Image (cartoon, helix red, strand yellow):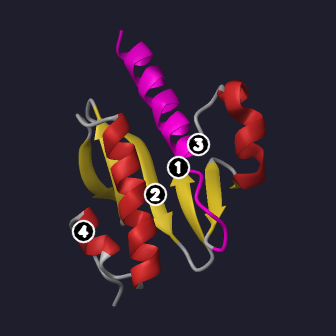
Amino acid sequence: MKTQFKTIDGYIKTFPKDVREILEKMRQTIQKEVPEAEQTISYQIPTFNLNGKGLISFAAWKNHIAIYSIPPGTAAFKKEISPYIKGRGTIQFPLDKPIPYDLVKKIVGFHVERSQAKKK
């Protein structure tokens, strides 16, 4: 039977120590950029909701950490994210390379700006 996660903590604790540390730093990076977001689980992965809608999600896989989704209109940093785009709407950071947390901050900031613009 597949695990049904209820919290981000529950999700993170199922991984080996090295991956847990990356997931926790990913969570902290997102939380710093959008402290008012609600932390939840959606589709069985950690998700940050803002204004009742999914803002950004992340997940650990065998060889990478994924961020969902790529915001439309990312021309401002398209060159920076292009090495990490592996699927439609997904950014994948290989586990055997340093995670570019500054890029994660930019992506989250872009999502927040888009969310606030939609709200107005």
CA–CA distance in space, label 2 to label 3: 14 Å
Dot 2 or dot 4, earlier in sequence: 4
What residue did someone put label 2 on? Answer: 58
Q: Residues within 10 Å of mark 4 (few under 14, many from 20)?
A: some
Relative to 101, say whether 5 is above or below.
below
Relative depth, front residue between 23 and 97: 97
Which secondary structure class fits the magenta region best? helix
Which quarter of the rendered picture does the N terminus lie within?
bottom left
Q: How far from the left and from the top, in percent, is residue 105?
A: 49, 39
What residue did someone put label 4 on? Answer: 9
Q: Residues within 10 Å of mark 3 (few under 14, many from 20)?
A: few
3 and 1 marks in contact (CB < 8 Å): yes
The magenta segment: 96-120
Dot 3 or dot 4, earlier in sequence: 4
For badge 4, the amino acid type reads Asp
Dot 1 or dot 2, earlier in sequence: 2
CA–CA distance in space, label 2 to label 4: 13 Å
Relative to 84, say whether 110 is above or below.
above
Quadrant of the rendered image containing residue 43 = bottom left
For badge 1, the amino acid type reads Tyr
Indicate which label's residue lies in the foreground, 4 or 1: 1
What residue did someone put label 1 on? Answer: 101
